[in-house]
Amino acid sequence: MTAQASQLTSAQEPAAVSPAAPVIRVEGLQAFYGAQQVLFDVDLTVMPGEIMVVMGGSGSGKSTLLRHLVGLSRPAAGRVELLGLDITRARSMEMLALRRKIGVAFQGGALFSSMNVLDNIMLPLREHARLDRKTMEIMARLKLEVVNLAGADALMPSELSGGMLKRAAVARAIIMDPTLLFFDEPSAGLDPTVSSALDDLILKLREAMNMTMVVVTHELESAFKIADRITILDQGRILLVDDVAGVRRSDNPRIQNLLNRRSEETEVDAQAYLQRLTGETPTPPAATNETPEAS
Ligand SMILES: Nc1ncnc2c1ncn2[C@@H]1O[C@H](COP(=O)(O)OP(=O)(O)O)[C@@H](O)[C@H]1O
Ligand SMILES: [Mg+2]
């Protein structure tokens, strides 16, 4: 009895104590387009249930990294491991099985304009699962409910707003109940209210379905809201991987530059424009003629 009990505990202990293994592990990833190298020695790990946000300026390699993470591009060097499978060496049958566990909502991943919302969302099911139409419809309607599009099933994509289109794309990405979900710029081109609703949806998915996510975004507010950790790419190299607080307090000027980019861009541009017009350095605003006591 006692022996049995102690056997039970010792059998349970290792699982409880050992830390979870990463679900995404990238080591020494290098990527090229022709002769141009765009990723240099990228290392990255993502833990189960984690939301990893990837940030960086335009052209820094975010989309290229994502394409490698989902196996759409083969690395020139390095390893990409998803759910324990080294996808740089995986056989096509293994890749197929893995793809069923991955949901992808990419920037250009629009819906097919010739199909209604329901048929669009059922597409991955038709590709990967052998189910009768009725079952697939029910599964698709459940996912439409998750993304707050219940009732939009018969609409054509042209009848949806920008925010609805994105949410439909998310519904399609989660139709197979993926373990891993990848987003490329989910809120690009959306107004702030809609993009904030999309952030809520991302958080809700993680909560309800315990998905692990990699989200590429250049929206700072969005990144700070959803991220467990943030990876910052700069010209194909990882500049920093840290949690939100760590990114905020980083004193790396390139990171500060990225964080302040928007305000900085407008300020610098206005000043440069003025300089170009006047051909001289603008003088700081003088307080002299503004003082009421002067006259
Ligand atoms: N299909 C392609 N062919 C050639 N160069 C590309 C291609 N896609 C991206 N690039 C280049 O690779 C670099 C990284 O691009 P990308 O990964 O799209 O960056 P980001 O998503 O951060 O804006 C950029 O310099 C870009 O011009
Ligand atoms: Mg991109």
Image (spheres, rainbow, N blue to C red):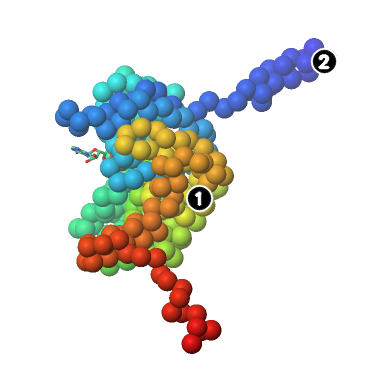
- Asked if residue 86 is positioned above or below residue 258 in the image, the reply reads above
Is 38 left, or right, of 285 in this rendering? left
Question: Which image quadrant is residue 36 in?
Answer: top left
Count of numbered circles on the image: 2
Q: Residue at x 50, y 56 (%)?
A: 200
Secondary structure beneath label 1: helix
Residue bearing mark 1: 224
Q: Residue at x 27, y 28 (%)?
A: 31
Which quadrant of the frame does ligand 1 lie within?
A: top left
* Residue 283, percent from left and from top: 35, 65
* Residue 4, percent from left and from top: 77, 15
Badge nearest the viewer, 1 or 2: 1
- Asked if residue 134 is positioned above or below residue 152 in the image, the reply reads above
Q: Mark yes or no: residue 87 visible.
A: no
* Residue 204, percent from left and from top: 52, 52
Residue bearing mark 2: 1
Q: Quick check: is the Cβ at mark 2 less than 8 Å away from ligand 1? A: no
Q: Mark yes or no: residue 218 visible.
A: yes
* Residue 163, percent from left and from top: 36, 62
